Image: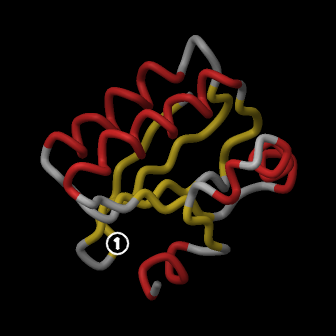
């Protein structure tokens, strides 16, 4: 997995690519926690290039969201492939996370 950070209209977009699993999720976690330490909000995570996610990847997002709560930070997930969306739906996490079709939609919200 590779994690790219970009600035989109003054908002940090985290774009992982490849598989987010127990081997690669620590790198994603490190990037997210670095942004959370700076109290960045919102943080947008674009999943368009993610091919697979396991429970450790999902746990990384849950941990990030919990750590953002004290400063009322927002974690917005965008561009979710259908196969990944099924996992969020099955686990009912689609009700927990803010999910959007695109980065622009997340910024406008």
| Residue indicated by mark 1 | 8
Quarter of the rendering containing residue 31: top left
Foreground residue, 87 or 79?
87
Mark 1: few/some/many CA within 10 Å (<14, 14-19, 20+): few
Give the x, y percent position of residue 90.
85, 44
Q: Is residue 51 above or below residue 19?
A: below
Q: Residue 80 is drawn in which quadrant?
A: bottom right
Quarter occupied by the N terminus: top right
Residue displayed at 51% across by 39% down: 61
Residue at (66, 63) in percent of width and height: 79
Quadrant in which residue 21 is drawn: top right
Task: Report the side of 30 relative to 79 (left or right).
Answer: left
Q: Residue at x 20, y 55 (%)?
A: 71
SS label for mark 1? strand
88 relative to 56, above or below: below
> Residue 97, percent across and down?
57, 57
Give how far across and how far down residue 33 sits, in percent.
28, 34
Q: From the viewer's side, name the closer residue of 20 and 4.
A: 20
Position of 91 compared to 64: left or right?
A: right
Residue positioned 23% across, 74% down in the render? 10
């Amino acid at each position: 997995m590779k994690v790219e950070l970009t600035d989109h209209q003054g908002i940090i977009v985290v774009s992982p690519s490849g598989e987010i699993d127990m081997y690669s999720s620590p790198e994603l976690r490190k990037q997210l926690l670095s942004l959370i330490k700076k109290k960045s909000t919102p943080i947008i995570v674009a999943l368009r290039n993610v091919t697979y996610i396991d429970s450790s990847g999902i746990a990384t997002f849950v941990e990030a969201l919990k750590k953002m709560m004290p400063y009322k930070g927002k974690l917005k997930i965008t561009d979710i492939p259908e196969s990944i969306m099924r996992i969020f739906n099955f686990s009912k996490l689609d009700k927990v996370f803010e999910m959007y079709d695109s980065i622009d939609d997340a910024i406008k919200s």
